[in-house]
Amino acid sequence: MEKVQVRFPPEDLRRIEKEVAQGKYPNKSEAIRDKVRKSYILEAIVHMREATEGLDEEDELRKLDKIRDKKYEKHKKSSC
C-alpha cells in the first residue's frame, strides 16, 4: 500500500474517530479506505441510473445487466 496524507474538516474526522471508538473499524485508515470503496459503489449506482433514464422497464433491466456485468469484471480485475 502507498502512504498518502489527507486533510479532513474537523466534523468529518470526528465522525470517523467516533466509528473507530464504537468498534465499527479497527483504525482510522481502515475507516477511510472503507468510505472510499463505498463511494465507488455509489458512483456506479448513479451511473446506472443515468444510463437507464427514459428507458422502458425491460430495456432498463437489460442495460443494467450489461453495466453490472462490466463493472463486476472490472472490479474482479482490479482486486486481484
Image (cartoon, grey):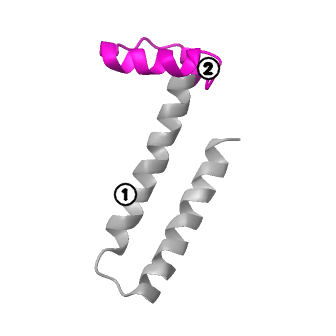
Q: Quadrant of the image for the C terminus? A: top right
Residue bearing the label numbered 2: 1
Q: Which residue is rendered at x = 40% and y = 16% of the image?
A: 13
* Residue type indicated by callout 1: Val
Q: Is 26 left or right of 67, judged from the image as shown?
A: right
Q: Is 75 left or right of 38, judged from the image as shown?
A: right
Relative vertical location of residue 49 with respect to residue 24 in this rendering, above or below? below
* Residue type indicated by callout 2: Met
- Asked if residue 2 can be seen in this view, the reply is no
Q: Where is residue 25 drawn, in percent x and y? A: 62, 23
- Compute the Cα span from label 1 to label 2: 28 Å
Q: Secondary structure at mark 1?
A: helix
Q: Nearer the viewer, residue 68 or 13?
A: 13
Residue 56's tag is none
Q: Which residue is rendered at x = 65% and y = 48% of the image?
A: 77
Q: Secondary structure at mark 2?
A: loop
Relative vertical location of residue 37 with respect to residue 7 in this rendering, above or below? below
Residue bearing the label numbered 1: 46
For the residues carrying marks 1 and 2, which lies nearer the camera in this image?
1
Q: Which residue is rendered at x = 54% and y = 65% of the image?
A: 68
Q: Where is residue 22 drawn, in percent x and y? A: 59, 20
Residue 29's image quarter? top right
Q: How many marks?
A: 2
Callout 2: 10 Å neighbours few (<14), some, many (20+)? few
- Range covered by the magenta-colored residues: 1-30
